[in-house]
Amino acid sequence: MTVEELQKLDLFKELSHSETAKIHAICKATKVNESERLFEMGNPAHTFFVILSGNYMVFFSDGTAYTLHKRGEITGWSTVVRPYQYTGTAVALTSGEVLAFDGSELLRIVQGDAALGDKIMGKVYANVGEHIAFAQSRAMDVTKQ
Amino acid sequence: MYGLEAISQNNGWAISIVGVFIVFTGLLSLSLIIRLFPKLIEIIEGDKKTEPSPSKELKKEIEEQKISLEIDKNIKEVVRQYRYLISWMGEPFSLPRLVDLADKRGLVRPYSTINKLIQAKVIQPDGKGLFLWHAN
């Protein structure tokens, strides 16, 4: 994936070319097979994912879940949100491709560049807005365990 | 007195046989009761529905017709299998539990099949993290 292609994703639309290049340096396109897990609940959140293709389900210990189907949707945002621990488990419903970001590198960039951090975090919250309340209540459960 | 002689002297063989008989009779009774469960549930569920409504078969047929507009013939059998699982689970249902159940029942590619059912809006989210069957 090129910097230009990355910039077309909703999450990075507001970034300048140089800012997108910074992000581009820490991402890696990865193929995912049906039923493959991207991350598991309770594990340290090391990787943040942007969907390029395929369909995914994020589910929680109480049996609730939501599904992701669109290019540019994100998952694994516990990587940039305290307590940096996955609150759910993400599994691929079909084979597809995701963009994987190293969590600590992403956090370093977000924390090191306030303007860039604001743009990304704003988009993260907007993108996952409908799921935030959903997952935050489960984050409490995870931290209690 | 020890060993087999003691067992014989104190009716040990007879007691053992009676014990085995009791255990097996118990297990047999239990299996028969469990076998009757689906019928009992059907009777209980049937009694709940007091309002006059179209027959189950007719309802199924109407639903099948609606679905067939959206998905192909092969999927119909899959729809039937998943509808059965969901009716067993009750609604609203947990999507990961449905995947797990379908997997355990040996249904082919449960992840992608459930995705197809979601895409066809046969399975829809209830907005609270659970899912509904063909909610319109």
Image: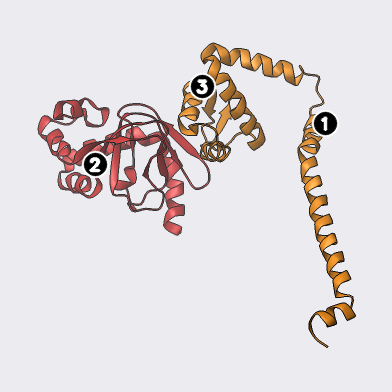
Between the residue at mark 3 and the residue at mark 1, the CA separation in whole angstroms equals 31 Å
Q: Is residue B135 visible?
A: no
The residue singled out by tag 1 in the image is B47
The colour with which the image depicts chain B is orange
10 Å crowding of disc 2: few (<14), some (14-19), many (20+): many
Amino acid type, callout 1: Asp
The residue singled out by tag 3 in the image is B121
Work out whether residue A93 or residue B123 is closer to the camera in this orientation and state it: A93
The answer to whether the residues at label 2 and label 1 have Cβ atoms under 8 Å apart is no
Question: The numbered mark 1 sits on a residue in which chain?
Answer: B
Amino acid type, callout 3: Lys
Which chain is drawn using red?
A
Which residue is found at the position 22% from the left and 47% from the top? Answer: A107
Q: Left of A101 or right of it: where is B85?
A: right
Which residue is found at the position 62% from the left and 16% from the top? Answer: B64
The residue singled out by tag 2 in the image is A101
